[in-house]
Image: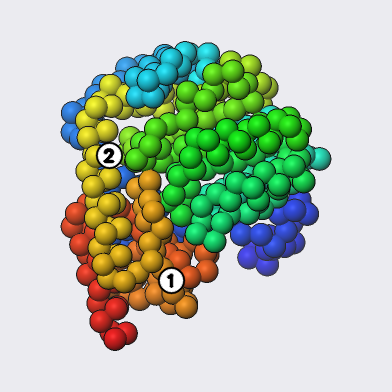
Amino acid sequence: MSDVSIDDLPVRDELRGKSPYGAPQLDVPVRLNTNENPYPLPEPLVERIAERVREAARHLNRYPDRDAVELRTGLAAYLTRTAGHPVALDNVWAANGSNEVIQQLLQTFGGPGRTALGFEPSYSMHALIARGTGTGWISGPRGEDFSLDLPAAQKAIAEHRPDVVFVTTPNNPTGNAVPAEAVLALYEAAQAAKPSIVVVDEAYVEFSHGDSLLPLLDGRPHLVISRTMSKAFGAAGLRLGYLAAHPAVVDAVQLVRLPYHLSAVTQATALAALEHTDTLLGYVEQLKAERDRLVAELRALGYEVTDSDANFVQFGRFQDSHAVWRQILDRGVLVRDNGVPGWLRVTAGTPAENDAFLDAVRDIKKEQS
Ligand code: PMP
């Protein structure tokens, strides 16, 4: 068996020589590398999940609700309450993580002969999912300070006329947000050029100083807001992402979703988590305070830090960021080298985890001086 490698298989040309998504899953004491929520789910929620899953288990001989109506109703209520903007069942769609939401969007609006554009550095899976769906990828520009360079971004849209535009706000891995006016200007540019679908990836919006862009959905049928329960809800293991958009977009993704894609166990678990929204959002407040502490302390240590609206912080600059990543790891703390030259990213953890990280970088600074 071992004499056959991937290169010997008749894989699609565009996958040849490529690497899969690969954040290292290393067993170290402090893991601050994948922007997870560090707090385990509270015990009453664990109990409620068990109850709901037990009930769902009684019906596992049947396929789950294909349209996930109860869950989408709950998600719509959550969005309505937190964004102060009415969102209804038919505006919402859910899938296994927002990665699957993005995949369904690219299967629907991208695909062979079509292109998607994102402003990089940004979430690397946008480009990878584009490749997996046969969608051409266009790397759009960002400013020197990682902010969105609006004139350059508008120019890229006009020039390439992409079918799908990704705007990640707050952006990963840089942490900064894109102002609503800039998103609106990009939407206008995208409509003038094609018109294309604009996907606003709001995976981290609950950690932002600003508000969700959900109210922009009004009157903009080509705008899609993508969200997840992996970050603010502390449920990365659940795999539940969702989108809000015009009902026609929700109808369109039905054309590509696999039947019964969202298991009854997933739906039951997500519904239990929604019942505990207020407790979970309480952790978000703590994480925002810890994020702000990381920014302040890293700056006090003399690092450059990108403003953060997320649950992570980008810091630098390093001549050899990978060597520093390794030095931090040697001190028992795993951060992320996203391949942005000169920069690393650290996720806000518990106060004790953040202290361990700050001790590690302090130690490295001391060694250098
Ligand atoms: N969007 C962004 C910007 C992300 O950073 C992530 C996860 N790192 C995702 C989407 C995907 O999250 P999930 O599939 O867990 O919902």
Whole-percent x and y of residue 189? Answer: 68, 36
Please indicate whether residue 340 sits to the left or right of residue 46 in the image: right
1 or 2: mark nearer the eye: 1
- For label 2, the residue is 284
- For label 1, the residue is 317
Rendered view: 269 above or below 145:
above
Please indicate whether residue 131 sits to the left or right of residue 169 in the image: right
The residue at 24%/51% (across/down) is 290
Whole-percent x and y of residue 259? Answer: 60, 22
Residue 61 visible at all: no
Whether label 1 touches label 2, CB < 8 Å: no
Q: Secondary structure at mark 2?
A: helix
Label count reads 2
The residue at 38%/46% (across/down) is 310
Whole-percent x and y of residue 20? Answer: 58, 55
The residue at 29%/78% (across/down) is 365
Type of the residue with mark 1: Arg
Q: Looking at the rendering, in which quadrant would you find the N terminus?
A: bottom right
